[in-house]
Image: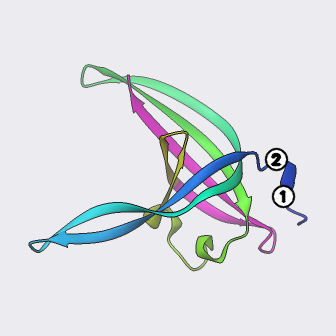
Amino acid sequence: MAGLSVGALDREVTIECLVAQGDAGYPTEKWDTLEHGVFMSKVDLRGSEKFLAGQIAANVDTKWELQWRDDMDPDCLDIPKTRRLVHKGRIFDITAAMMIGRQDGVRLLTVAGSWL
C-alpha cells in the first residue's frame, strides 16, 4: 500500500453508522456499530475552547487515516452524514472524507466536542 504506512495505523477505533428509526411516525437517529477494532492513524490538528451558555466548550479537530474499505468510499457514500468514529469512548463526528491515492486508503477529518 503506497499511500499509508501500516505501522502508523496504531489507534483502535470503532466505526458507527447512522440508522434512521421512527417511532409513531417521528424519525429519530440511532448509531449502530459498523465495525469495532479498525486500526487508523490519528493526528490532532488543532483545539479550541470557548465559553457558551455558561460552560466551556472544547473542540478538537483530528485527521484519521485508514486502509481502503468499500463501505467507507467517499465517492459512493455521504460519509460525514452516515458515519462517525469512537475512540476511547470519545465520539468524533466526521466533517470530510477523501480518498488517499487510488484506493490506498481513506482520510477522515473529524471534530470532537466536549463540555467542561
Q: Is residue 111 magenta?
A: yes
Image coords of residue 72 (percent x, y): 60, 70
Q: Residue at x 66, y 36 (%)?
A: 44
Residue 98 lies in quadrant:
bottom right
Q: Which region is colored magenta?
A: 95-116
For label 2, the residue is 8
Which of 103 and 21 lies nearest the eye of the viewer?
A: 21
> Which residue reaches farthest bottom?
76
* Figure check: 56 above or below 16: above
Q: CA distance from mark 1 to mark 2?
A: 8 Å
Mark count: 2
Label 1 vs label 2, nearer the camera: 2
Q: Is residue 92 left or right of residue 56?
A: right
Which of 30 and 101 lies nearest the eye of the viewer?
A: 30
Q: Is residue 89 left or right of residue 27?
A: right
* Kind of residue at badge 1: Leu
For label 1, the residue is 4
* Kind of residue at badge 2: Ala
> Which residue reaches farthest left?
24
Main secondary structure of the magenta stretch: strand
Q: Residue at x 48, y 33 (%)?
A: 59
* Disc 2 secondary structure class: helix
Which quadrant would the C terminus be assigned to in this image?
top left
**Residues at discs 1 and 2 in contact (Cβ within 8 Å):** yes
Image coords of residue 78 (percent x, y): 50, 71
> Which residue reaches farthest right?
2
Q: Is residue 20 left or right of residue 70?
A: left
Residue 27 lies in quadrant:
bottom left
